[in-house]
Amino acid sequence: MRASVWGPCPHGRFGGPYRWGTLDGMTELMLIVPHPDDEVFGLGGTFARLAERGASTAVLTLTRGRAGRTLGLCPPAELGELRERELRTSAAALGVDDLTVWDEHDYVPDDSRGIPRDAGLQDRPAEALERAIALELDRLRPEALVTFGPHGSNGHPDHVATHLRVHGALQRGGHVPARIYHYASEAPYDGAARPGFLSPEEIRDRHQPPSHRIELAPAEVERKLRAMAAHRTQALSVLNFMERFTARLFTETFTRVGVGGAPVAPGAETRTVSFP
């Protein structure tokens, strides 16, 4: 991962860490997600493939993930800093060229995290976030963009808010990637209800079947696993993913959408491709 420089948060909300990367001009692939670790489960192998080909890639993470569990690895007040370090290690393992980390607040569901409850990204001024995301799109000019779908994969309010803010940014008249994708799973959500999340019924109603599938080579899976291991504070999430979604270690799936988030070819058969 190339060197980067500190600077102020562009929309002036919290002022904390904001990292400008070094890519300039057209980027092959950009990912926009809310939390550290969101980069690896659904796109890690694809990042590894593009790195091997010498293609330029970028990740914008809207928060430092301070609302996660510490697993005793640090005090709660230091979790955001530790998770950012984990993210940088993961991105380096995947060969990501440009990593930008904002310090927006993420969703804090209860008092058990050692920090005050917080509604997270859904409570942040929409226009300011969309303008800031649009600036990053203009800076990096990605050919392809990936983000969360309308159900946020598991109904997480930060995932859903990121989906809304990214598509809001795309409609502001700046750079629009030639290809836009959502993370997509083959099967509809079958998990339990969680406080503050979309209900299981809402998640299933918003399900978008994948239009594109990437089957990973062994070396790409190896780099993906190495990046997953970097997220030590998220060890329980990593183990849950490996147990429940083993096939997704070896296959990554997406649905192609237009500006606004509707699938380009609803009902079409999933295509296996080398890169979406």
Image: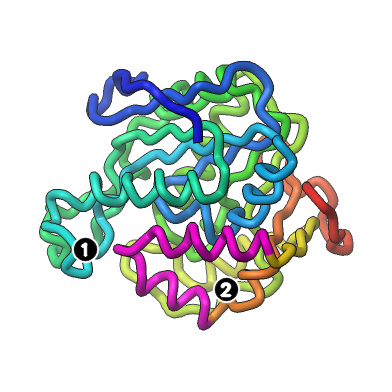
* Magenta span: chief secondary structure: helix
What is the distance, in whole Å, between disc 1 and disc 2 at their CAs? 27 Å
Element under disc 2: loop
- Nearer to the camera, 107 or 195: 107
Say few, some or many: other residues with alpha carbon within 10 Å of mark 2 (under 14 / 14 to 19 / 20 or more).
some
Residue 189: give its label: 2
Say left or right for 34 vs 111: right
107 horizontally vs 239: left or right: left
Q: Identify the amino acid type marked 1.
A: Thr
In this rendering, the answer to whether 93 lies above or below 144 is below
Quarter of the view holding residue 51: top right
Give SS at disc 1.
Answer: loop
Residue carrying label 1? 70
Q: Residue at x 21, y 52 (%)?
A: 79
Image quadrant where residue 102 sits: top left
Residue at left offset 51%, top offset 50%: 93
Horizontal and vertical percent position of residue 146: 63, 44
Name the residue located 45 percent from the left edge and 69 percent from the top edge: 199
Image location (x, y in percent) of residue 194: 36, 72
Q: Nearer the viewer, mark 1 or mark 2?
A: 1
Task: Say what amino acid the circle numbered 2 marks.
Answer: Tyr
Instruction: Identify the residue at image location x=52%, y=38%.
Output: 59
- Stretch in magenta: 219-243
Q: How many marks?
A: 2
Outermost residue on the bottom side: it is: 243
Relative to the observer, which residue lies in front, 177 or 246?
A: 246
Q: Earlier in the sequence, mark 1 or mark 2?
A: 1
Q: What x and y, as percent, mark residue 67? A: 25, 55
